[in-house]
Amino acid sequence: MATKALTHTDFESTITDNDVVLVDFWAEWCGPCKSFAPTFEASSEKHPDVVHAKVDTEAEQQLAAAAGIQSIPTVMAFREGILVFAQPGALPSDALESLITQVKDLDMDEVRQQIAAQQENPAQENAQ
């Protein structure tokens, strides 16, 4: 499966309508982004069950701002509509492969319980 270009109009639906979504925030002028692109594309071919999407931060400045993007490339991973990973920097292929495995292996009931606990006790989260 080839990578999918996301815009503000289809970002949310792509995240919520698919089990696992990886998003690469990039820009045409960004050297590390261009270096990472073939790795991301190869991963999309290897994992047709994972949506590999790209957001051009120049064309989608409001979306990038809403996502809190401060450095590119930034890779985000969503599972069942929940952000489970976000990290700036180009990932080597083995790290990207490991990330996909970890995201697929997540116990999403446990993730939802952790999120609920954090929302109930936000002060406790800040104290740690």
Image: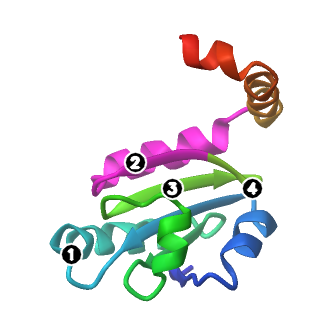
Mark 4: which secondary structure?
A: loop
Q: Is residue 98 magenta?
A: yes
Q: Earlier in the sequence, mark 2 or mark 4?
A: 4
| Residue at mark 1 | 30
Q: Earlier in the sequence, mark 1 or mark 3?
A: 1
Nearest the viewer among 43 and 15 is 15
Point out the residue furthest to the front here: 123
Q: Earlier in the sequence, mark 2 or mark 3?
A: 3
Q: Residue drawn at (40%, 74%), measured in percent from left and top?
A: 41
Q: CA distance from mark 1 to mark 2?
A: 16 Å
Bin the neighbour count of mark 2 within 10 Å (Cα to Cα): few under 14, some 14-19, many 20 and up: some
Amino acid type indicated by mark 1? Cys
Amino acid type indicated by mark 2? Gln
| Residue at mark 4 | 81
Q: Earlier in the sequence, mark 4 or mark 1?
A: 1
Bin the neighbour count of mark 4 within 10 Å (Cα to Cα): few under 14, some 14-19, many 20 and up: some
User: Which contiguous range is marked in magenta?
Assistant: 84-107
